[in-house]
Amino acid sequence: MLASTALVCLMVPGLALFYGGMVAAKSVLNMIMMTFGSVALVGCIWVVYGFSASFGDSIGGAGILGDITEYFGMSGVMKDDPKAVIPLSVFAAFQALFAALTAALICGAISDRIKFGAWMTFTGIWVTLVYLPVAHWVFAFDGKGVVGGWIVNKLGAIDFAGGTAVHINSGAAALAVILVLGKRIGWKKDGGAERPHNLPLVMLGAGLLWFGWFGFNGGSALTSSNAASVVVLNTFTATCSAMLGWLVVEKLRDGHATSLGAASGAIAGLVAITPSCGAVSPLGALLLGAIGGAVCALAVGLKYRLGYDDSLDVVGIHLVGGITGTLLVGVLATSGAPNGVDGLLYGGGLGLLGKQAVGAFAVLAYSFGVTWLIAKALDRTMGLRVRPEVEEGGVDVHLHAESAYDLAHPPVAEPEPAAAVTAG
């Protein structure tokens, strides 16, 4: 679990580079700052009351929110329990990164046009009102006299590592903020505002995310076991097939396969397999990944038809990929996998599919609705959007007084040593 926590932590720079490479050069530092800034803020909130709200005993036994006072300030977390499978402290650190990364995912949808202070304020409120309750619904299991969340316990839906709590949650929130914030200046399908400035950076970020995702999914088994091993195998398998699925769609639709498509397809596969990695066989993961990659490749084009400016395709990949992977559990799950449940194709009937749908769309509706209210309230009070001249001039310089690339002052060539000149 300590190793898995470290792997998930590497996803923070992975996400920052993945997002940073996809924006314009004048916005890359702002994107990296929004990623790291949200992680820092959520980490502090997690220690004070976030962990307790997510994993404390459910208030009133309703499965809606954990008792904020139970672990307030991480009280009781440091106590050594010889009967525990893992120390509570490492579980708290592991889950802290889930919360931080979920919030950070949202910033990719709103690049180039939101105030940094407004983003940080939004992050703190959003984690408190949206992520913490949803994490309790999905991740807090009943046990030892403790009542957990309603989705995992009362409904009985399967979400091994966060297809609902992380990806549907962040994707629905991203869509809500986009609708409040509006489009970038000059936004259009072939416009420069959407052109990635550094594709090798995108590929590097995707590779780091893929690497860290083994800790994200594998660590969710909470033990070094056969179950964790199957999860890691399924995670790798689905990512490979999703990349190919995306590239096939891209080739058929656009006439070429791109590096951006390969990176995006890999992330789509990782998103889709997250809820289902403990429920399907490796062959099932292969099929699930291919479907997830193809569906997400088609979904990212919806923003042009529907007219919402999802800068880095958070909605198309995380919302759509999360829904796809969550629903396919009800179809492709096999009792031979660690979760031990059969889906529709293995004779399990429609029951599991129905539970998966209820869980997925309950999270979608709650996240979208509450996030829209948060964004609208902040826009009416402190204002979310930067001034037009700041957006056009570049948020890096105006908001952070820095530039990622010192293009105005190229390096000066060093003069040759006198001895070399004489010898010549």
Image: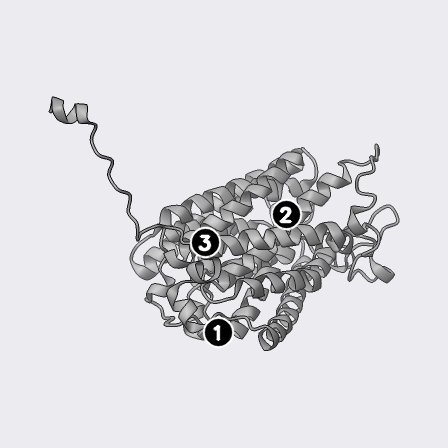
Residue extending furthest bottom?
380
List the residue tagged with mark 3.
29
Question: Is residue 28 positioned above or below 392 on the image?
Answer: above
Residue 339: image x %, image y %?
68, 45
Q: CA distance from mark 2 to mark 3?
A: 21 Å
Categorize mark 2 by other alpha carbons within 10 Å: few (<14), some (14-19), many (20+).
Answer: many
Which residue type carries mark 3?
Leu
Residue labelled with disc 2: 97
Q: Is residue 234 visible?
A: no
Q: Quadrant of the N terminus?
A: top right
From the top left corner, tell me how far across and down residue 52 is, in percent: 78, 52
Report the amino acid beneath label 2: Leu
**Is 188 or 278 nearer to us in this picture?**
188
Q: Residues within 10 Å of mark 3 (few under 14, many from 20)?
A: many
**Residue that mark 1 sits on:** 182
Judged left or right of residue 291, residue 7 is right
- Above or below, comparing residue 419 to residue 281 in the picture: above
The residue shown at (25%, 35%) is: 414
For the C terminus, the image quarter is top left
| Secondary element at tag 2 | helix
Choose the circle earlier in sequence order: 2 or 3: 3
Near mark 1 (Cα within 10 A), the count class, few <14, some 14-19 or many ≥20, is some
Give SS at disc 3: helix
Q: Earlier in the sequence, mark 2 or mark 1?
A: 2
